Image: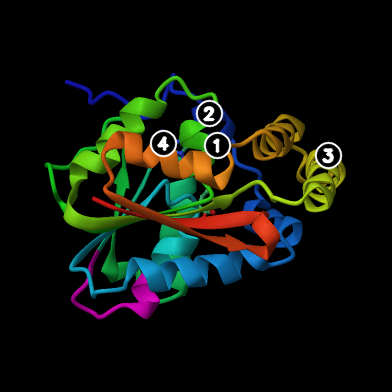
Amino acid sequence: MQKTHPGKGKPLYRMFNNIPHRYDLMNRMLTLRFDEVWRRKATRLILEGTPEKVMDLCAGTGDLAVRIASQSKKTTDITALDFSENMLDLARLKSERNKVDGRIKFIHGDAANLPFKDQTFDSIGIAFAFRNLTFKNALKDDALSEVYRVLRSGGRFIIVESSQPRSLVMKWIFRIYMKVMVDKIGGLISGHRSAYRYLAYSASHFYKADEVSDMLKEKGFTYVEYINLLGGFAAIHIATK
Ligand SMILES: C[S@@+](CC[C@H](N)C(=O)[O-])C[C@H]1O[C@@H](n2cnc3c(N)ncnc32)[C@H](O)[C@@H]1O
């Protein structure tokens, strides 16, 4: 019997599986390479306390998983999960190029229905995909419950994501940047107008950092803190189960 596809028919699957071939380049360009700085910072937090089992959730082209593999001990067990097979293919290639391919298990799976037992992971990281799982996503509660379920008690969920600047001036700059650079120019260069329109719209209207904290506490995380990045353009949340 054929296994059900983890992504087909799910919110955003088609958009991500038809990924712009310049996906990584676009990320670097649109964030002025800050995405790399923020992933590095998130990786340090993910590896704090030397976790044995770590997951990069919604791994995409594998930037976070490859970083985790490069910065962790050889014995750290690393899983990278995504529902887009095309993204995972790029992630595998990247892990080979960075000579960490033997270190990462690539899993084709859905965040809202994770193929793992309860309390499997000591640490779960997600880079620039928490917004996709939670912003106007009908499966938001399922995804959050699944992360909570597969994380061990005392384990940590580290989220690096765009956020909302607090000051009105920064908020205004952020919105203009999203509209002009991301929606218009990003859409033009990548050739995927609807994907970059979605990115600009969802980032501009995404939750404030305090609202993300409340959402995580409602799910059961006992201790939640966050670090604002670049005046609140982005934030890293650290949620402990
Ligand atoms: C914006 S990309 C971020 C990729 C990567 N984490 C990074 O740092 O660049 C979002 C990723 O989340 C994946 N994704 C979105 N919803 C998902 C879901 N429900 N289950 C698994 N992967 C999902 C997409 O396929 C895509 O690769």
Q: Which mark is residue 12?
A: 2
Instruction: Find disc 3 in the rendering and name its residue.
Output: 179
Q: What span is in magenta?
A: 68-77
Q: Is residue 73 magenta?
A: yes
| Mark with earlier residue (3, 2) | 2
- Tell me what residue is drawn at x 48 percent, y 32 percent: 134
- Compared with 68, 175 (above or below) is above
| Mark with earlier residue (4, 2) | 2
Mark 1–mark 4 Cα distance, whole angstroms, equals 25 Å
Q: Amino acid at mark 3?
A: Lys
Q: Is residue 179 visible?
A: yes
Q: Are marks 3 and 4 in contact (CB under 8 Å)?
A: no
Indicate left or right for 58 with 4 as reference. Answer: right
| Mark with earlier residue (1, 3) | 1
Instruction: Find disc 1 in the rendering and name its residue.
Output: 16
Nearer the viewer's eye, disc 3 or disc 4?
4
Does the beta carbon of the residue at mark 1 sit less than 8 Å from ligand 1?
A: yes
Mark 1–mark 3 Cα distance, whole angstroms, equals 20 Å
